[in-house]
Amino acid sequence: MIFKPRQLSLAGLDGEALAADKKRCKRFGPCGVGEKALYLNSFYIDRCFYVALSSVRRIFKRVAMSKGGFTGKGMFASIPYLVVEYDDGKRKQCNFKREEDVDRLLEYMARICPDIPRLSEEGERRLAEKAAREAARYLKELTPQAQRTWDELEQAKAKLSQDPARSRRLARAARTKRNSDRSNPAYKWVALTIVILGAAALVYGVWTWLHQNGTGVYFLLFGMAAIFFFSGANVLPTAKNNRKAVAREWEEAKASMRELAGEAFPVPYWYAHPVVLERMVRIVREGRAQTAGEALEVLKADLKALNSSVQVEQEEYDEVVCIKPIFLLQEYK
């Protein structure tokens, strides 16, 4: 272990146990989960802190929205964080690049530490209120056909839970392709041009600095800033970041889901996602549909009605941004 993580919690691990646990930890973005500790990041360095699992009191996701977050027009659609509460009220917030890494970490924590709450206190309160509101909307008694549809959808959800990575891949591929289709290809080449200029400025800055010219440091800083910014933003065209590669990944994700769903599935395989099935279950329980086909059509209408002018709760927003790109790419067919 080159760098020893800094201990945050009162409980700690000895040197050998810490090195072995960190080496074997399961990584999720910049953080990791070991058998004995959570490994957390700073703004720049991955897994440079640790909190003993015995000290963790609560762990949950927080999403900060930038301007335009609900429309996709902002600098960042969302900024995900992992928040860990430990000991007696201490808290560490970790920034993530991809929200799905936070979700995967929380899913893993649910398996290995089911007793640790995975919602904030405010989140638990809002979830209880939401459950009460939903219970008021649901019919107390369903028709036999609606009950059979509910059972069928629950069985389909259980089938998808056997391999959740395929569902995540489907949603991720749809979101990436949707963003790719909406973006102007010229932006990537503009970014590449700026990075080339930044690299030239970096070389010039080093040269002038070595020749003791005081202005060289400014070119050095500009070049480094341009290179790191555009590289970190995944703007540059690469072997994986181009339209053909994105389209291929989308088709492969659908084919993988088709293999998992099989023939007798209540929705087309390209819509085979747990969130789709869960929302269809709610539609049936509300009495808005009797069959899976009817529930899917109602769901399509609901998604079409949701746009940038509609305000929704965070939980529903998470669901919509997860599955709506799939429906948009398939043109709601």
Image (spheres, rainbow, N blue to C red):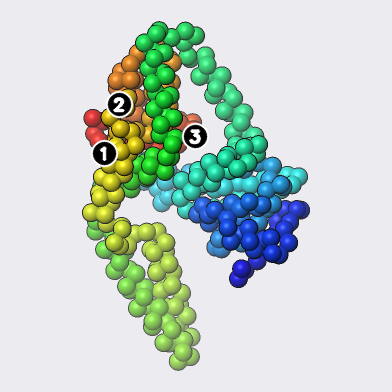
Residue at which label 3 appears: 314
Asked which secondary structure carries label 1, the reply is helix
Horizontal side of residue 83 vs 295, given as left or right: right
Q: Residue sitting at 33 percent across and 33 percent down?
A: 261
Q: Secondary structure at mark 2?
A: loop
**Which residue carries the number 2 mark?**
264
Cα separation, mark 1 vs mark 2, equals 23 Å
Is 25 situated left or right of 150 in this image? right
- Quadrant, the C terminus: top left
Q: Residue at x 29, y 37 (%)?
A: 258
Image disc number at residue 329: 1
User: Where's residue 223, x and y in %?
Assistant: 41, 74
Q: Nearer the viewer, mark 1 or mark 2?
A: 2
Q: Are marks 1 and 2 in contact (CB under 8 Å)?
A: no
Q: Earlier in the sequence, mark 3 or mark 1?
A: 3
Circle nearer the viewer, 3 or 2: 2
Residue type (three-letter) at the residue carrying disc 3: Gln
Q: Quadrant of the N terminus?
A: bottom right
- The picture quadrant where one finds residue 239 is bottom left
In the rendering, which numbered label is found on residue 146? none
Task: Tell which of 160 and 44 is nearer to you.
Answer: 160
